[in-house]
Image (tube, rainbow, N blue to C red):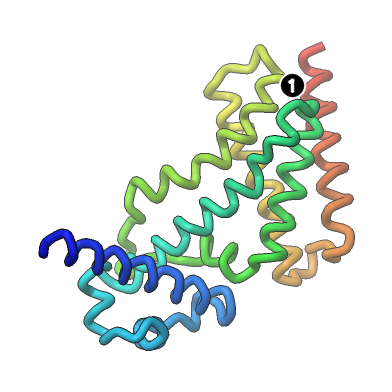
Amino acid sequence: MARKTLEKREDLKLRLIEAARNRIAADGLSNLRARDVTQDVGCALGGLYTVFADLDDLIIHVNSSTLKALEASLTLAEVRDHTPTDRLRNLARGYLRFALTHRNLWKALFDHRPLDDRSSPEWHLEEHMFLMGIIAEPLAELQPTMSETARAIRARTLFGAVHGVVSISLEGRFVGLPVESLERELDDFILTVAAGGAARQG
């Protein structure tokens, strides 16, 4: 009986995550309501709170699934043998394409703030760090003498730059770029960063 109960709880948990993910993808994070999600899966409102602490907890699990999808779209086996510059360009392009294809889910990764200024759980914060790891890998080839600490900082800086220009452009800010120009500009930006790194090594 206990095993069946656990299986039912896990099934409900997965269905709630999927329903919330679909709602966010269609209508955005700000329009997510617990009652709508539970209606979508055919359970009582209280059912959500048997598997999640609250709506914030559910959103964190949706964001976790989005991060896994982002990781899968960026860590492509076919580019592993490419030059470090080309791998960085591929990462920037892939990040842009993911943001364009899954805009509301991508925005939810950065827009969600738990109530009462609570911190996100450590396991979820650690999930975000895969981005830094896959950026740091080609950076290590471009600048092999750079310390691990400096490389980690450079990876965060590079991510912040790419994310920033993608974010302000998709939001239509006046300093943003037209969507049709973004990929070309990101390519040129990565080439400039890579050339600068190589020059410092020379």
Quadrant in which the N terminus is drawn: bottom left
Q: Residue tagged by mark 1? A: 142
Give the structural element (helix, strand or loop) at label 1.
Answer: helix
Q: What crowding class fits label 1: few (fewer than 14 Cα within 10 Å), some (14-19), or many (20 or more)?
A: many
Q: Position of residue 162 (x, y in %)?
A: 71, 48
Where on the picture, by quarter, is residue 154? top right
Q: Position of residue 202 (x, y in %)?
A: 82, 11
Q: Is residue 37 left or right of residue 90?
A: left
Q: Position of residue 156 (x, y in %)?
A: 59, 39
* Residue name at image x 33 percent, y 63 percent: 117
How many marks overall? 1
Q: Is residue 69 left or right of residue 64?
A: right
* Residue name at image x 25 percent, y 68 percent: 8
The residue lying toward the viewer, choosing from 166 and 124, is 124
Residue type, label 1: Leu
> Looking at the image, is 56 positioned above or below residue 80?
below
